[in-house]
Image (tube, grey):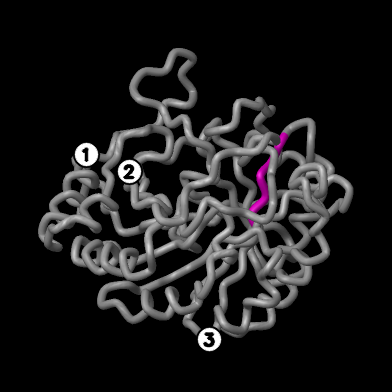
Amino acid sequence: MRDQFGRKIEYMRISLTDRCNLRCIYCMPEEETEQIDTENVLEYDEIIRVCKIAAKLGISKIKLTGGEPLVRKDIEVLIKRLKNLEGIKQVTLTTNGVLLKEKMQQLYESGLDAVNISLDTLDRKQYAQITKRDQLSKVLEGIECAMQYTGLKVKINCVALAGCNEKQWVPIAEFAKNYPIDVRFIERMPIGTKESFNIALQEEIQKCLDSAFGCSHKEENIQRGNGPAKYWSYPNFQGKIGFISAISHKFCEDCNRIRMTSEGYIKPCLQFSEGIDLRTLLRGDVGDDKIQEALEKVIYQKPRCHIFEQEKKEGHLEKHQMSWIGG
């Protein structure tokens, strides 16, 4: 299906839970936050019903997120069921990697196509400061484990924070040098937490990497994933370096996604609060046709673009933290 601006919407990110076993400073506030009541979280049967309908509208790629999706029980069962849906071509996962090693075999056997692993630093002390947990060793074990599975696409995501993890950009990029995996650097979007961070922009990161590895070459017209990342090649690298640069290189004109929170709220744009509550429809006495009509409406009305760059912002901006929305 296409939205009102002619963009083909084929990708849906689904949050399975707002729970997480880390407390990353840019995702969750340091103080305790109110969690979603479990009875308000969509059951797997409800997620399957939504995806079956969405597939009829052209959604063919599903990304499972959280919170931390691996804390959700029997996630491998959901993945297998999604893979068996007509029209769903790909099911992928974003994780912080803490539970990945112990879950990887089941995930792979369920048919998981790709896994994105969050890693902002290789310094154990700094990792504990950023995530509020001393779990770096488990994440590294998870990455090593995932790379052993033939056909599984593995990517590392690093949120680049100026004044925080600059010294780690080169060591993290070396994963792409030493292994056939991609490393993506993400410009943090100002969503959720009130704490302010200096956003490291793509040019700053590239300058750092070029100084360490030599001149890079942009990979033109090559699709290496389902999202907005643009990829660059470095000499003697087995993998690629990607940039997800929502602030400095706005990619809204090519946006192909919608999001569903763990409560069943469909968001057509990350920045804005507008969307539609599918949970009420799912648990009401309505047929699939009514749910399809709701999805068609929210997809068609997808906003043209975000307005992060504007000093004075208009509209209904998202106030929830990323753990509620889904990463």
Task: Say which of 242 and 213 sits in front.
Answer: 242
CB within 8 Å, label 2 to label 3: no
Q: Quadrant of the N terminus?
A: bottom left
Of mark 3 and mark 1, the one earlier in the sequence is 3
Compared with 162, 125 (above or below) is: below
Q: Position of residue 3 (x, y in %)?
A: 21, 45
Observer able to see residue 223:
no
Asked if the magenta segment contains residue 197, the reply would be no
Type of amino acid at the residue the image marks with label 2: Pro
Please give the label number shown on residue 268.
Answer: 2
Q: List the residue tagged with mark 1.
A: 301
Does the segment drawn in magenta span residue 159?
A: yes
Give coordinates of residue 61: x percent, y percent.
Answer: 37, 65
Q: Secondary structure at mark 3?
A: helix
Going from the N terminus, do you reach mark 2 or mark 3 first? 3
Q: CA distance from mark 1 to mark 2?
A: 8 Å
Q: Residue at x 55, y 35 (%)?
A: 189
Taking the image as shown, residue 83 lies to the left or right of residue 210, namely left
How packed mark 1 is, by other alpha carbons closer than 10 Å (few <14, some 14-19, many 20 or more), is some
Residue range in magenta is 157-161
Q: Contact (CB < 8 A) between labels 1 and 2?
A: yes
**Residue beneath the point at 78% across and 66% down:** 138
Q: Nearer the viewer, mark 3 or mark 1?
A: 3
Q: What is the three-letter code of the residue carrying label 3?
A: Glu
Answer whether residue 141 is visible to the viewer in this image: yes
**Spatial distance from mark 3 to mark 1, Cα to Cα?**
38 Å
Image location (x, y in percent) of residue 180: 67, 72
Q: Which mark is residue 193?
A: none
Q: Residues within 10 Å of mark 3 (few under 14, many from 20)?
A: few
Which residue occupies the extreme top position in the image? 312
